[in-house]
Each structure stands twice: as structure tokens, then as C-alpha cells.
Amino acid sequence: MKESQGQSNEKVSHTDDSRPWLEVNHLMVQQGPFRLGPVTFSLGYAQCGVVIGPSGSGKSTLLEALCGLRPSSGTILLGGRPVEHLPPEARQMALVPQDYALFPHLSARSNILLVPRLRRLSDQALQERFHTLIRLLQLEPLLNKKPDQLSGGERQRVALARALVLSPTLLLLDEPFAALDPQIRPPVRRRLRQIFKELGTTVLLVSHDPMDAAALADMVYVLEKGQLLQWGPWDQVIRQPLSPYLTDFVGINRLTGIVVSQGDQRYLQVGTLLIPVHTTLPDGCSATLHFYPSHVTIHPTPAPHTIPVKVVERLDLGDRFQISAEVSDGVVVTLEGSGPPPVSIGQILFITITAQPQPDQ
Amino acid sequence: MIVNRLFWFWASGSLLLYVALLLFVTIVCVAFTGPVPVLQQVRSPDILFAVQLSVRTATVSTLLSLLIGLPAAYRLAHYQGRFKDIVDGLLDIPLVLPPIAIGAALLVFFSQFPSREPSLDKILGRLGMPILFEVPAIVIAQFAVISGYSLRVLKASFESLNPRTSAVARTLGLNQAQTFLFVELPQAAPGLIAATILLWARAMGEFGATVVLAGATAGKTEVLPISIWLAMQAVQFEKALAAAIVLIIVSLGALFLFRSVTRVRL
């Protein structure tokens, strides 16, 4: 088994750059009433993939199925090699759980070196890698401490070193930032990105916070209720977000209604309100307006094609402001502008929206 | 305020009462026999024989019980099947059954199975390993009584481990057996030590099953509890109490030694 786990083979086998490093086909997990998948996706070599989705969407289940801790159907190819039938120890993926799960009875140094020692991997390359990780993760002062003497961030660094020292074919991180204080998340994200790039590690990480994807993701996978709703390069997905989870994150407003005509003018009817639009969609078609707050113009007085809205929240953010305004019953849009907010709560504003309605599927 | 004080008073009072009771009984014992007969007893060949037989059999039965109890408890802690409750219930039998009944059941098993002639005991006897009323019977009796405890304590300590440490070890490349030996067992060490202490102490004091299965032959199957019983039968209360005091001293001394050794190792 040791031979087949030799990492040199893996690196050699990665010659075809056009082929993804991780290829998952129709992966499915049944766990009581909850079903994950079938999901199909891929991830390139030395890239960072981020799985995002609300809690209960099956993110952790996906990681556990990938590393073999949970029975699943479907195929998993890693570097062109099928691994779905292998036990976890032969897949060469390394998992870092949300609570880091350091071995509590061992010092930080032994936590990192336990597995290499048991697998008798004590060659030059391992030593070099150990010292590289000590330097990159600044572990020198922590090596002789037990896990209960370490802070959350320090535990995470030890857990990362423990996983990375074996040069895993795929590093799996479950909510790596959830246990950290919000203030230290951005610097930790920056450091992780730098380390992954420096070591050329392929990473799949799971998070409920799209900000982690914005900071780290080459590829993003949006999971909702066990289904893969959308995936692809982050810069594409974030411009065409399909899931409310992501549209809310980027602040995209959504107004759904029916296309109607009055004379030559076409409208999207949302509740009792008529929003003037330019569209070739037929009357009666259900359609949605997606627009960023910057696509809304605020008018102080009624003008042709303006819509009246009622201010329900105003956030004064110093050099800019954000306003939530009710379009009709319960339908709220977000508006932005610079300077102090020019309105008070309850006031009626008049807006025009520059956007094309998209037909609903 | 007053509630807190009352609560602490109640807790401290209970502890004090318990300690006082134990001390009182011990002091009465020593006062009744006097230190001289105890010292005489300690030097008597009967008691020396009983001490070494007790220590030897209790150690062997504890080791046996750990050897089987560890993997069994590990499996049980991970078992989530539909027979979980039934298996759990079956394993409580040694706990709820009086030791004397366990002894009786084992006696029937060895003397009537597979038939009365020849019984298992006779078959083993012909092979040069007689069981009933011999030293192996003591070990079997102790083992049967303490194995129920060993499963309970060990299962609890395996269940208290973070299952994700084992999951991580697997993904890092350790197989199931390596994960058990190098990740789970060391974490369960405190529970293992507690179990060893409990089992050994319980085996040292085991009487009911032993007397039925091994008999009470002086100088042959005479462990310390049997010594006490034999002395009581002969209406030698001084001797009985002296043997009891020896039992306490030997047991506490050995447990103290074990605790200090394992603490250093940890």
C-alpha cells in the first residue's frame, strides 16, 4: 500500500494540464432523509475551490464523501485515478475539520509528525517540507505545546501543517474560518492563499460565508439543499449568480413580476406596481429584473417612467449611504449613493431602474 | 447567599460523613483485633499464601478482561445497529446478577456441558488442565464477575472521544488498526487506567462466584476473601478481621503504586 501512496507518482501523473485534477461524477450520498446530489464538478490542479451554501446544504457531507468517510455512489477521479472504492487512508486527501481535531494527547510537533513516522516517511523531502511548513505557518514557538495550550488560530496552523506535511493530493478544509474571530479572518485568508500557491496545493474548502470564496476561490460551487446549483470560475459565477444566497451577498436586487403592455409602453407588473421596461418578451411572461443598486437612479420629484418607493431603512455609512425602500407589499430594493443619505424613513422617493427583465425558468 | 452556603454545607457534610464512617469501621476493626494479631497474621504462611494467590489471580483476570474488553468496548461504542439496545441489555447481565449466581451458572456449565459424562471440566482435566475447584476456576470466576464492569467503563471512555480525530487520522493515511492503537487508545488512557483500578480492586474482593466455582480449600484455592470466610466459619473473628485489614492494605498499596506509575507515564 505504501508504494501506491508514494506522492512522486502523483506528481508525475499530472502532465496533462487540460484535464482537471479532481473530477466528480454523479456523486450521491443518502443520509437518512437527506440526500446529497447527484453532483458533478471538477477542479484544476493547484487551484482553490470553495463550496458555499447555507448550513444544512450538505457541504460537510460532500467533503466526508470525497475523502471516503461516508459511503457514496458515483465516481471520483483524482489525477485521472479512480479513488471512490479506496478506504480513506489510501485516497491521500487530508481533512481539516471545523474544530481542527488535533490529537489532544500529543504536542504540536507530534501532531504534525505522528502519521509520517508511523508510515516511516522520514526522508529528506519530508524533513524539508516540515521545515518549510514551520516557517510558513510560524510554528516554531508552538512545537512543544499541547493542543489545549494553543489559541484557535494556533490550532488551525498546527492542523494545516499536520495535513500539508504529507503533500496530500487534495486538501479538504471544513469551515476553516468559522472558529476564528471575525477581525483576524482577512489576514488568515491572505496567508492561506499565499501558502497554497507557494506549495502548489489543490484545495477544496467549505464555507457558509461567500466572502471566503471572494478572497480565495479560483472555482466556486454553490450548494443548496443537497443540490449543486451552480459552479464555475468565481469571476463568472459572481456576475451571473443564480442562487438567492449569492445574489443577496453581492446585493443584487430582484423584482419578479409579469410582462404587460399598455399601448406602446411595456411594463413589468410587480404586485400593483407597473415598472417601465424595454423587452421583447411576450405579454403574460413571468420575468425577473436583476439589478445592482448602482443601476438605480433616485429622483427627488416624480418624472416620466419613475416609480414611487417608500424608505424603510437608511444606513449612514460616512462617505456613502444605503437605503432599503419598499416597492410594493413586502418587496424591498436596496439603493446606494455617496454622501449622507438625502432622505428620512417613511419618505417617498422616485426611482428609475436600468435593467432588462430575464424570463423565469 | 444562604442557599449557596446550605448547598456547600450539605455536600461537605456528606463527604465528611462518608469518610468518618470508613475511618470509624477501620478503627473499630483494628481496636477489636489489636495490632499484634494483625502483624502475626501477616507473617503467617496461610495469609502470605492467600495474599500472593489473590494478587496473582486478580492480575491475570484483570489483564484477560482488558484484553477482551478493550476491542469489545471499542466495537460496542461504534455500534449503531438496530440491536444496540438488546446487546446493551445482555451486557448488563453480569452487573445485575449476584456473583454467587454467576458462580452457580458457571459450575453448571463446566460440570454438565456438553453432557454429564464427560463434562467440559473432565475433558479439560484429561488434557491436563482441570478447572473446577482449582486455581483456574478462581480466574474464571473473577473474570466473569468483572468483565461486565470493564465493558461499561471502557465503552464510556471510547464514547467520550472526539470522533473527528479518528476521521482525520484515517484521511492522513492511518488504517483502522493504526488509528485505534495510536490515536484512540492513547486518548482513552485515563479511562483505561480507571478501568484497570476498578477491575483489579473488584477482582481482589471477589468472593461469591469464587467460592462456588473454586471451593474454599485452605492452602489451595484460598484467596483473601476466602480466608476471611474460612476464619468466620471457624469463629475466629480476630483472624477474619486481620485478613480483611491485610486485604485493605495490599489493595490500597497496589492501587497507589499503579496510580503513581501511570501518572508518570502520562
Image: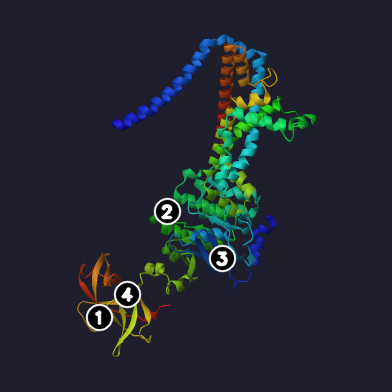
Residue A353 in percent (x, y) is at 30, 79
Real-space Cα distance between discs 3 and 2?
Answer: 31 Å
To which residue does mark 1 refer? A306
Labels 2 and 1 share a subunit = yes
SS at circle 2:
loop
- The tag on residue A180 is 2
**For marks 2 and 1 on the same chain, the one whose residue lies earlier in the sequence:** 2
Q: In this view, does B137 lie to the left or right of B35?
A: right
Q: What's the amino acid at mark 1?
A: Thr
Q: Mark 3 lies on which chain?
A: A
Q: Point out the frontmost of discs 1 and 4.
A: 1
Real-space Cα distance between discs 2 and 4?
Answer: 33 Å
To which residue does mark 3 refer? A27
Q: In this view, does A246 lie to the left or right of B192?
A: left
Residue A112 in percent (x, y) is at 56, 49
Camera sees residue B189: no
SS at circle 1:
loop
Real-space Cα distance between discs 2 and 1?
Answer: 46 Å
Q: Is residue A281 above or below residue A312?
A: below
Q: Quadrant of residue B184?
A: top right
Q: What's the amino acid at mark 2?
A: Leu
Q: Mark 4 lies on which chain?
A: A
